[in-house]
Amino acid sequence: MLTPALYLSAVLFVVGTLGVIVRRNAIIIFLCIELQLNAVNLAFVALSRYTGIEGQLYVFFVMTVAAAEAAVGLAIIISIFRHYETVNVDKFNVLKW
Amino acid sequence: MVTGVSAALLAGLPASAAGAVSEAAASAGASTGAAAWEPILPGLIVLLPLLGFALNGILALLAARDSSAALREGRDWNPFAGPRRPATHRLPSWIGPGAMALAFGLALLNFLGMPADLHDPVIRSYWGWIVTGDLRIDAALQLDQLSMVMTLVVTGVGFLIHVFSVGYMAGDPGYPRYFAYLNLFVFFMLVLVLGSGFGTMFVGWEGVGLCSYLLIGYWFSDREKSDAGKKAFIVNRIGDVGFLLAMFLLFQGFGTLDFIPIFAGAEGRVAAGGVAVTAITLLLMLGAAGKSAQIPLHIWLPDAMAGPTPVSALIHAATMVTAGVYMVVRSSVLYALAPTSQAVVAGIGALTALVAATVALQQYDIKKVLAYSTVSQLGFMFLAAGVGAFTAAVFHLVTHAFFKALLFLGAGAVIHAMHDAAHHGDGHLDEQDMRNMGGLRRYMPVTCAVMWIATLAIAGIWPFAGFFSKDEIVWYAAAWAGAESNPFGALYAAYWGLALLTALLTAFYMARLMVMTFHGANRTGEAARSHLHEAPGVMTAPLIALAALSLFGGWINVPEELRMSFAGLFGALPMSEWLHHWLEPVTHAAAEIQTAGFGEAARTAPVGGGEAAWALVSTLAAAATVAAAVRFTSTRKYVPAAEDPGPRRGLRRAAYDKWYFDEVYDAVVVRPVVGASRWCWKAVDTLVIDGFVNFAGNFARLAGWAASLFQTGQVNMYAFVLTLGFLFVLGATVFL
Amino acid sequence: MTDLLASILYGDWILHALIWLPLAGTAHVLVSSAERARNVAFRWSAFVFVLSLGLWWAYDPGDGGFAMQSSAPWIEAWGVSYSLGIDGISVFMVLLTTFTSAIAILGSFEYVKTRRKAFYALMLLLETGVVGFFLATDVFLFYVFFELTLVPMYFIVGIWGGERRIYAAVKFFLFTATGSLLMLVAILYVYFAGGTGSFAYDAFLNAGMSLREQLWLFAAFALAFGIKVPVFPLHTWLPDAHVEAPTPGSVVLASVLLKMGTYGFLRFLLPFFPEAAQHPAVVAVMLALGVVGIIYAAWVAAVQPDAKKLVAYTSVAHMGFVVIGVFALTLNGLQGGMVVMISHGISTGALFLLLGMMYERRHSRLIEDFGGIGRAAPWFATAFAITALASIGLPGTSGFVGEFLALLGTFETHMATGAIAATGVVFAAYYMLPMVQRVLFNELDKPENRKFADLSRREIAILAPLVALMIWIGVHPTPILERTEPSVQAVLERVEDARMHAGGGEDAATGAAGGFRSFAPAGDGPAADPAPSGAPAAPRAAGPPGGGR
């Protein structure tokens, strides 16, 4: 049971990573980040079967952080959208030097 | 602290800190049993002019406060407008000469009280000036025969010149400032001659240089005059470096800078003719050349004539410029141990005497003639020191102080008269140019008479003062050339020839000056002529006093042979060789060393003939030259300065242009140094060093800019690089 | 006086008071109004100065070791302590600092018109830093104060400066910081490699570095202090900083901050690395830099059109005399260096004040904008002339005593160097007199200059003590010389002892038992202990002040 779960986790993570790298829409990037987090969660749950309850504990931890992050992140995206009227990340590159 | 010091000065008592030196001197004195003499308040002699400076200085500052306030408010300020001068312009007339009179009186008292057989100098030490480690320089005065003579000259002639200044400077708005500087000068000059070591002497040495600077540039609003002051200071400082280095060498050799231990130990400590003593004496000579305007550092003195004429008389003729001679005489022991240096000193002296005399022949500015004459006469003094005739050097120094001060003051009286005349005349009249004078004898007979006395004295005509002193120098040059074992015999014979020639030139240019100024037709111009006048009494009185000294001053040191040989002619003089005997305690050590090294001086000149014979020859030759010059000059036609371009070409033009010393220095020294300075600034400082610094700064900025290019601001890009990095690290951990 | 001071236990509290009172003043300035800030600041600095005057009597030269010592642990884990002490070298630096701080604050009344509170707070903070630097006997503490001085000066130049103030301030900061970081590395190296276990001054003395190590460490320290001095060719920050700094900044910079460099030479460089300091190559390099500095800076000064820049370059020339005096390694040279430091602090500080007064009146620093000021403002001219003459070392002024001794001391061991350096006397006249002439003399041909106001009462009050000091030190420097001599002698003996033992191997400094000379007072220093390597000079409680050995 472990191996397929870890494979699924890896595939989800790679999909998430690729999404973050190649997509330009902030919302999609955001969804991809969530995908990465959940891929990690899956790996944690799968592994907890062999290593103990701590893995599941971390999953709750990650979910809490992800929820907070989603709230803050979406708020930022909304305020950016209000300002620039776009969520294309190529358009806001003011965070450089 | 300060009050303690001044109290000690006033009391003339040694301060506790200086006990060691005083005791050393006292014990040295005790051995010969001549230490009983107690000088009377010697510190006060020095302190009085300083006090005068302080008082006059305060008055000067007060007066200047008024004048500058008037300037700011756009008012006219004339201290002489009212019926009575303001106190600031009245009191200095008393403070300035008064301080000098008191100082002179005190010096005279000490001089009269000083026993003739005083073998060891009396040291009065006041406080330890620079005391650290093994170095000890005391603020101490040394009273001996030599310093006493110098003190008398400085305070005596100084007093007369102060009195003269009361008249000469009467109409100058800066009157109190003038007297403040003048008093300060006398203070430093006294420190110079009374200082008990090279360290103390150096204080006076640079101090008089400062006052010279201030007084040359006294009318500082005039660019040319303040340039002249600056030039004097800088050229003097070149000499001072020599003095400093000599002091350092002396300290290394002797561990002290005091005169007494150095001169007492010199014979034992340094090898006669060795490198050390030769270096010391040559460096000292560099200092002396700077101060006493000898080639190659003589260029400042003619320019120094920019100062008020009494200043020229006091500083640039009678006292300060003779400081170099005093210093060489003071160090006679060292010079006696260094025959090479002596030959150099004599050579510089002889050469300077001749070169300056030739320049004087062609000058038209009355003060320039006198300035070059001073340079020339100083050359004579150095020649004397160089031939070991230290007494003769001092003798000429003294007589020269009399007659040259008289000449300058006389010239001052002439300029004073010409100034008033020029004021009323038409157009611009150069009041110092002799081509604009002529026939002044009718308007100022007293000045003319006293100046003739001085002229005859400097020309070396019997029985005026200059005859005895100059003749002695010329004679010693001859005698020295023929000394038993003199390695430089031929050289000295040449010096003797130069000295003789220069003596004749002196007679010529002085007679030329007198004729151009006082005789013949007047060239001043109609309108101005009626305003020519004799100087007021306050100015003529010092002239007359100096004339008396120029007439009789030479009698203090008539050589025995002269007195005896032409009885009835020279023999009428009351005493012989007084100065020689008087200075014996100071000069005998040097004389012994020289006799040991060179043997007895010759009794005949290089071409034969004894002292008396050559004295007769020289006075007759001088008289003939004066007569010839009078004849030659009277028959020449002079046109007013404005119409005369000066000699066209040839040697006369070169002499007129002062042999181009200034031009050469400008090209060889001044321009290269200024050029190098600019180069250092623009090329080294700005371009290289700052260039490197700015490059370092700009490089950091550039590197930062280059690195910042990676910050695109695009989140995906960052994520991509992040992933790549992660994969790289992962790969590295797995596969390596 | 001494008894009176003893009766109030002056020696026990004065050093702390001198450091922390200016800081209290900083706080006071910050809470007072902008109008009152200058008065508050001046009163604090004057109060500190008056307090510090007691040191003249209370400091007993004794054997030249530290007096009035006190120590308290600060960061015990690293062996860092808050230890203070004063000796014949630092006593005059402290007096100079308190004096010029008060004078500079008084001199800034008309000059500083914006952000006054901040300005005076920084001036007092600077005083704390500098006094602390001079009094610290713990290397860590010393470094902290060294860096502390950097901050206020940076802001003083950067905020109240002239047009290019940012460039000047950054340049000043970067130069100094570069050097001090290298020095920090060197300090840490001694701390760890030397196994001192403590940052105490005496512990560093006994660190026992090999010659090779010493040379590297020497280079790091010399660079840090050499930049501060500044030694040619590390000087180019100085003209910029001086020109751009406001008058009081220039005054403190010239009078005090430059002295931190030469003080560092005397206090740290020579005693810590005595073998390196007398290594022939090191001596040759330092002397050469000193001489080049004297002549080069004089030349460059002479052709400056900006009066303030001219004076800034003369500082480089003056400090060159200190450098040669110190590295001649003779008593006279070191003493001369000391006097030049004091004298330069007074005369150059005064020159900057005078230039500031000129700037306040005419808003120009260019020499050619002046001329004939002697007629318009005779009192100003008198003060200017006296100061200029003191600066070029006329006998009877402070400048001469220092230069004479420094040259004499150099000449004793390095004849040619001394002879070349002596020509600096001529070049001093070459740069100063034309400036004096073009400012004070010549024709009063510019109408603006006719209105040039003479000195006000406040300005007279500023300049009079400075002029008096120049002349007093020139006429009677012995009281100063005799106070510095034992301490300077101690530095010299430390170097000479290392020379004596240098033949015994690389670890000569450690093996220098017996002839070893410590700076510590009797009892707890290794001097009394024949085995210094086993006598760690741990942070000490207050030692007996001025105890003789």
Image (tube, coloured by chain):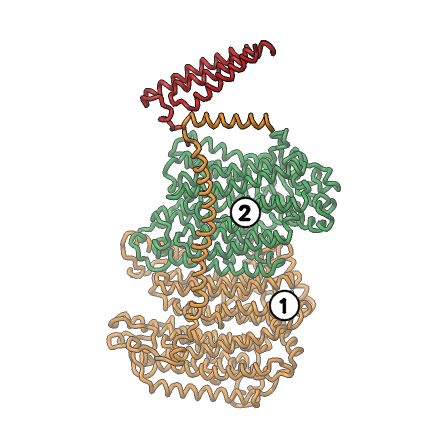
Q: How many marks?
A: 2
Judging from the image, what secondary structure is the residue with disc 2 in? helix
Could you tell me residue B44's position as x and y percent? 52, 61
**Apparent colour of chain A:** red
The chain drawn in orange is: B
Q: Residues within 10 Å of mark 2 (few under 14, many from 20)?
A: many
Q: Circle 2 sits on which residue?
A: C226
Question: Residue A17, percent across and down?
Answer: 46, 21
Q: Nearer the viewer, residue B23 or B317?
A: B317
Give the letter of the chain under mark 1. B
Residue C524: name its quadrant: top right
Q: Cα distance, mark 1 to mark 2?
A: 36 Å
Residue B276, labelled with which disc? 1
Horizontal arrangement in the rendering, residue A33 relative to residue C476 (left or right)? left
Chain letter for mark 2: C
Colour used to depict chain C in the structure image: green
